[in-house]
Amino acid sequence: MNCRRRSRSKPTAACPGTWTGWPNRPETMTDALASRARRAAPAALALCALVLSLFAAPAMAIDESDLLPVDQAFALSAEAPAADRIALRWKIADGYYLYKHRISVKTDPAFAAQALQLPKGESHTDEFFGQVETYRKTLSATLPGRTGPAQVTVQVKYQGCADAGICYPPQTRSLTVALPVAANAAAAGNDEPLVRFGNAGGGAPPLGGGLLGGPSPAPGAGTDALPLPPEQAFGFEAIAGDGNTLLLRFTPARGYYLYRDKTSFKLDAGAAKAGIALGAPRWPRGSAHRDEHFGQVIVYFDQIDVPLPLQRSREDAAKLVLTANFMGCQTDGICYPPMTRTVAVDLPRGSLSAATTAATTADAVPLETNAATAAATGAAPVANAAPDATLAPASATATDAANTAAPAAAGQAEDSRLAADLSGPHRWLALLSFLGLGVALSFTPCVLPMIPILSGLIAGHGPGIGVRRAFTLSLVYVLANAVVFAIAGVVAASLGANLQILFQTPWVIVAFALLFVLLSLSSFGLYELQLPHALRSRLGTLSDRQQGGSWAGVAAMGALSSLIVGPCVAPPLAAAVLYIGQTGDPWFGGAALFLLALGMGVPLLAFGVAAGKGLPTSGPWMVGVQRAFGFVFLGLAVWMLARILPGPAALALWGALAFAAAAALGLAASRPSGRSGLRVAGWAAALLLGVVGVAQTVGALAGSSDPLQPLAGLRGGTHAQRELPFRKIKSLADLQREVAAAKTAGQPLMLDFYADWCVACKEMEKYTFTQPQVHEALDGFVLLKADVTANDELDQALMRELGIVGPPATLYYRDGSERRELRLFGYEQAPKFVERVRRAR
């Protein structure tokens, strides 16, 4: 399934890449400092999430043309001239051609098929795939195998195109071939039970050839006409690099790109019995791309090779079935739904993984890993994988499950804007921004508990300490803390830590929204977050053993202090880890984390020089900051829920939040103890928020959904933002019933395909279907909507029957027949859409 994408800035081609304690203080002092840390802990969690945004722009529409039925365009037959050989023949219609590199064969295990022998094809610069070999008129191929069975079932996969520039989706045909009896037929080799895509004679080689020294297949070519079928747009292959690594290859066609953070991998249940689990994939550097609905994402335009480490508790050779789920888009075109491919790989004998690796791999689930952390959980294994369809260690081939329903691993895939800025060209400027962010964090309650710790270390040196000595001790303390931050970030990145994929499914979105609500309640003082008492006691004991004033003692205390600060500033740390995962450059990411911690230590350096004078202490101002962050957390909860709630419901929540914030500011400003200037400012802010709350509430009641323009639907009448009266259908039977009813009533009919994960669908809803001229043009139409978000069997059957690759697609019917020449794929602006509707009337 696809949905047309548009973007204001087209992403560039991807670059193929590589990849607390307290000294000498009584326990009461420890408890006091830990209490401050508890109250402060939620404060910085909002900083990373506050910098996410969404952007996009319109795109062009695509029309479809009629083609010959596929079995008329490419007539396939098979026979066995000998007991150890099967001949395949295609009769190709004039004006059509087959791709050499898209032909593959799989047989019963008893036949032990070798590599399919294909003749040299005609060199052709294809509109879709670039420089390829093709066949016209006829094609004869030979499949050697082993003498033995009386008959063999041959599963043939192939793909071809019309000269008009439209390509068929990959085809799979199963043929039963009777083998002649041969008394002395020699058994064919059993090195490669599953045939590769093509051979050394030409065409695009399989993954083994490209990774192990042969030429890599050239990317395909995109088209401005009908979108390519999923298997044609996104190639996927895998081999066993060695006993401890799988090597994966993704090949987007030219003009298409792959999402990194919507990719997940999963092993079958047999892998667990063999003592094999997936580690974190090592992604090469990608390109940053921003759009309105998916936010800042990392994509790949060119072919990439991805090492996927394996964790092994047994050394024996094993047979694995790997399932890959991924998503991708056409540049300035449609986006495909979650695609699923399954490959079978023969894994040779390997070495045992270190126990520490298995214990510390970030988010490495026993059988599943994903793009950004190895974290897109929930991918379902693909059924119907042939039990013996395994590969020799050098090759593997994708199954036919390209468009099988995969779980919606992704309602949204957004990195924080901080991580996106780091991925940009100005990397040193990004490092300076991390330093600045650290300085900003130093004035939050997170860092204040470190002040008395450093004070005790300096005091431990005794009276008469000079400025230079105090500065040196403070610098050692801050550097030790920063080094711990950097090491932790590099290790987490090396293990694939990336948290953004957790925001992909509705239940995770709801869970995180509830977490922000709980954090807000803590900020409002309803309860406190604290470390376990045993951990607090141990930290105090360790700090008491350190000798104040010594450099080693100060460094040890700086490292221990990171245990206090680390949880408090987790969101900026997560953003840095996002960046590290995107670039595959843990050392540069480690430098960013180092500078973040160094920035947090700048006030501590000043404190050390000033001997503890002049820095702010706890007081009412800190309580006010804590309460303010409570509303920030509530705003983050609403922002996350807005992804899955209807627009008016989300707008109503924004209005309620604005009212609550206005009430809190009004209460604070009404206290007589405050300064007059601050009271006036508080009342002004409360009044402004109250007006915003009223506007958002009224807008929600009127059906609006934009929190920044809640009253836009009221300008010029409510008709401007009125939704079209679609009736939802689910199955082909529903459509046939509605088409028949519309024919009887003499009404034209429009069918719109929609999905929640479809960018252009939302654009059509927001920018086209809300326009008054569109409502006027569609007056008298029967309006149907097929919501294919689930991508289940009924959805796929409906799209397959209608020849729809994916949403958004708009079909028009008149007198019971479809007006195929008016089909619309992707986003279209209101004026052109109105012209199309008038032609369909």
Image (cartoon, helix red, strand yellow):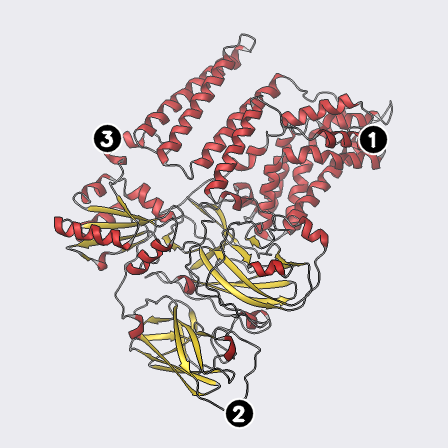
Q: Earlier in the sequence, mark 2 or mark 1?
A: 2
Distance, label 2 to label 1, CA atoms, is 92 Å
Q: Secondary structure at mark 3?
A: loop
Q: Which mark is residue 717?
A: 3
Residue 708 in view: no
Quadrant assignment, res 322: bottom right
Q: Measured from the top left, where is residue 8 in percent x and y? A: 40, 48
Q: Furthest-top residue in view?
A: 672
Q: Residue at x 59, y 30 (%)?
A: 42
Q: Measured from the top left, where is residue 97 in percent x and y? A: 35, 75
Q: Which quadrant of the rendered structure holds the N terminus?
A: bottom left
The residue carrying mark 2 is: 184
Q: Earlier in the sequence, mark 3 or mark 1?
A: 1
Q: Residues within 10 Å of mark 3 (few under 14, many from 20)?
A: few
> In the image, is 763 to the left or to the right of 131?
left
Q: Measured from the top left, where is residue 736 in percent x and y? A: 22, 54
**260 vs 538, nearest the viewer:** 538
The residue carrying mark 1 is: 469
**225 vs 139, nearest the viewer:** 139
Q: Which mark is residue 288?
A: none
Distance, label 2 to label 3, CA atoms, is 87 Å
Q: Measured from the top left, where is residue 502 in percent x and y? A: 53, 44
Q: Secondary structure at mark 1?
A: helix
Name which residue type carries label 1. Answer: Arg
